[in-house]
Amino acid sequence: MPTERVRPSVTEDAKLTDFEPGADDQEVEPADDRTPSETGLQAPTAAYAWGDYECDRCDSPTERVWHDEGAFVCPACKRW
């Protein structure tokens, strides 16, 4: 079965200066420096984590926790 050749999107003779802002004369908007509290957004909460944890419901040690109704819980306490 023949394999399809994938062409690189950047040529071998490309220079780093080709990728500098303004190199193609397009305007670049400044970054939004507002904090989440200034925008009204809240930081996301992780749904899963691993490491050395203690379950918020049964207080048993666990290496895996899931976010469930505002608490980080072990697999046995997670409501699936």
Image (spheres, helix red, strand yellow):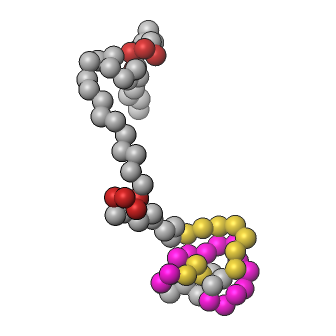
Q: Is residue 39 above or below residue 20?
A: below
What residue appears at the point 55 percent right and 69 percent down from the top-left corner? 48
What residue appears at the point 45 percent right and 63 percent down from the top-left corner? 43
Q: Quadrant of residue 20?
A: top left
- The one nearer the camera, 10 or 18, is 18
What residue appears at the point 41 percent right and 29 percent down from the top-left corner? 3
Residue 44 in percent (x, y) is at 45, 65
Residue 66 in percent (x, y) is at 56, 75
What residue appears at the point 40 percent right and 62 percent down from the top-left corner? 37
12 in the magenta segment: no
Q: Is residue 1 above or below residue 35?
A: above
Give the residue furthest to the bottom. Answer: 58
Work out whether residue 8 can be spotted.
yes
Residue 73 in percent (x, y) is at 60, 81
Side of 44 relative to 74 (left or right): left
Side of 11 relative to 48 (left or right): left
Q: Is residue 56 above or below residue 9?
A: below
- The one nearer the camera, 33 or 78, is 33
Give the magenta part as a residue range. 57-70
Residue 1 in percent (x, y) is at 41, 32
